[in-house]
Amino acid sequence: MWWGVGAALVANALYSVGFVVEKRALGSLPALSADRPLRVVRVLATSPLWIVGALALAAGFGAQLVVYRALPIAAAQGIFVSGLVLLLLLSSAVLGEEATGRERYALGGVLLALLMVVGSVREGEDVVSGGAPWTLVLLVCLPALAAGVWLYVRVESRATKRHRVPTSGIGYGVAVGLLYGVSSLAIKGTSGRLTTGAGPAEAALSLLGSPYPYLLLFTSVAGLVMSQAALQRCRASLIVPVCTTVTCVFTAVLGTLAFGESLPDDPLLVALRVGGTALALSVLLAMPRHDPRPAAPPDHRPGPYPTDAPRPLPPTPRSPR
C-alpha cells in the first residue's frame, strides 16, 4: 500500500509541475480555440517549454498506472486531490496568481474532504479490483463524455458573447474534469489488463479487445485541445483545482461502483468516505462562476469632465459701458 501512496505523491508533483509549466508557456502563444483542434496541436508543438510540461504530465500518467495497481480507487483519488496544495504554491510562485478569500476557503474545504476520504482507508480492508465488465464501463463513460463536450461548447459559446462578465473557468474545469474522469477509469482498466499474469502478447490482445485504449485516445486528444484552450484563458490556480475535484469525485464514486470495490464495513469509515465526497461537491457548487470585473483606472472615473482634461473656466463678466 505504501509504495502506492508514494507513487501517488510523485504523480501529484509531476501533474502540478506539468500544469504550471504549460500555463507559463501558453502565455506567450497565440490565442487558442477548441474549434480549430489541428491548429491547437500545431501551435503547441512549436513551444519547447510547453513540451516540457507535457512530458511531466505524461510521466504523471505512468505513475498513475502504478497507483491503481496498489490502492483502491477512492483512496487514490483522495491522495490525488492533495496535489492541489502544491499546485497553488507553484501557481503563486511561478505564475503570480493569487486566489480570492472565497476561493481559499473553498480549497480549505477540499483539503478537509481529502482528509475525510483518506481517513476512511484502512490497509488490508479495502480490495483493489483488477477489472470490470466493459459494458458497465461504457454505460458510465459515454454519458459523461457527452456531458463534458456539451458543457464545454455551451461555456465557450457564452464566453464569446460581448458584454458578458468574464468567466472564472468553473464551467471549463467541470467539462474537462468529466473527460479526465473517464480517462482515469480507462487508466484503471488498462492497469488491470496489463497485470493479468499473461504474456505481453496476450495482455496486448486483451487490452485491444477492451474499450480502454479507445477511451484513452479520445480523452487524450479532446482533453488536450479543450484543456489548453481553457488554461490559456483562465487562472491555473482555479481551473485545475475544479478539474481535479470533478475528476476525483467522478472516479471515486462511479469507478468504485463500476469496478466492484465495496465500501468499508465500519459505519464510521463509510460516513467519512461519503461525507468527504459530498463536501467536495458542495465546495465545487459554491465557488464563484465569474471573475470580478476589473476596476476602472483612476484617470477614467465617471463625472462631468475627464480627470485628465482641464475644466473650462467660468465666463468672464463683461464690464459695464
Image: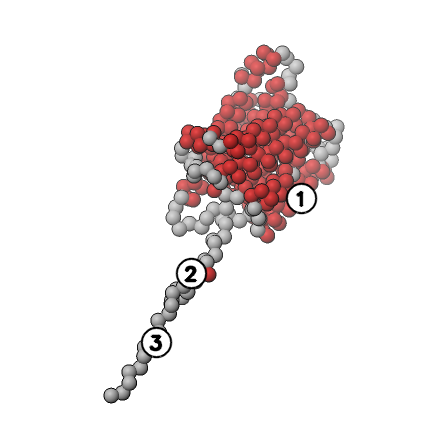
Query: Residue placed at 58% from the left, 30% from the top?
Result: 56
The amino acid at mark 3 is Pro
Query: Residue placed at 75% from the left, 28% from the top?
Result: 124
Calculate the distance from the C-alpha at mark 3 to the C-alpha at mark 1. Answer: 65 Å
Mark before the other along the chain sequence, 3 or 1: 1
The residue at which mark 3 appears reads as: 314
Q: In the displayed structure, would residue 102 be above or below residue 187? A: below
Q: Quadrant of residue 303?
A: bottom left
The residue at which mark 1 appears reads as: 112
Q: Which of 24 and 287 is in front in this view?
A: 24
- Where's residue 229, x and y in %? 46, 37
Calculate the distance from the C-alpha at mark 2 to the C-alpha at mark 1. Answer: 44 Å
Assign a secondary structure to mark 2. helix
Tell me the quarter of the image containing the N terminus: top right
Calculate the distance from the C-alpha at mark 2 to the C-alpha at mark 3. Answer: 23 Å
Q: Which of 265 and 312 is in front in this view?
A: 312
Mark before the other along the chain sequence, 2 or 1: 1
Query: Residue placed at 67% from the left, 29% from the top?
Result: 7
Assign a secondary structure to mark 3. loop
The amino acid at mark 1 is Leu
In the image, which disc is placed on residue 300? 2
The amino acid at mark 2 is His
Regarding residue 185, the answer to whether it shows in the image is: no
Coloring scheme used: secondary structure
